[in-house]
Image (cartoon, helix red, strand yellow):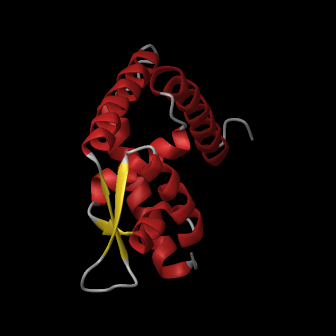
Amino acid sequence: MKNSFSYSIHGMIWLMDSMANQLLKEKYDITFRKFYVLAVLSSCQPTTQANLADYLGQSTAAVSKSLTVLEAEGLVTITVNPDHKRHNVVQLTKQGAQLTQEASMYLEELLQQHFAETGVNLQQYTKDTVALRNRLEQVASSTYKK
């Protein structure tokens, strides 16, 4: 079991999330959960809260709660969509974009340092991981409910 694909992937994700949470708290005073919302938002902004919730795989209520905190911290802006008054548009602030970029580079650099010792070709591993994720997204969207 310990050497199975799914066990290994879940274990690695859990370890990476735990490490990232600790590192981000120490260096940037932000949790990995908040950082992840910012990172996802940075790749799809501007967007609506509902779209962001879909990207994150979370309920709109959970995302609304997270965004309210991030807005109070000056990291995102939430504005009413003038064309659809019931939809809020979310964007990173300059401070939020800068934090996201710096923290992303910091985490990426540290992980690459740690993984370099394994001898694994990280470029190829990343390509393979993206291909696997894309396939799972296709299967999930056509087979499973969110």
111 relative to 8 in the view: left or right:
left
Does residue 10 appear left or right of residue 28 in this picture?
right
Q: Is residue 118 above or below residue 73?
A: above
28 in relation to 138, above or below: above
Quarter of the figure with residue 125: top left
In the foreground, 88 or 117: 88
Q: Where is residue 4 shown, x and y percent of the image?
A: 66, 42
Q: Nearer the viewer, residue 13 or 52?
A: 52
Q: Is residue 25 above or below residue 140?
A: above
* Residue under the point 26% across and 63% down: 46
Q: Using the image as rendered, state which of residue 12 and residue 30 is in the foreground.
A: 30
- x and y, in percent, of residue 77 in the image: 34, 57
Residue 121, x across and y down, in percent? 34, 27
Measuring 43% from the left and 56% from the top, which residue is drawn there?
A: 133
| Residue 13, percent from left and from top | 57, 40
Q: Name the residue located 53 percent from the left edge and 21 percent from the top edge.
A: 26
Q: Residue furthest front?
A: 72
Residue 79 appears in which quarter of the rendering?
A: bottom left
**From the viewer's perspective, is 13 left or right of 108?**
right
Quadrant of image for the C terminus: bottom right
Q: Quadrant of residue 109?
A: top left
Quadrant housing the N terminus: top right
Determine whether, in the image, residue 132 is placed left or right of residue 100. Answer: right
Q: Which residue extends farthest right?
A: 1
Numbered circles on residues, count: 0
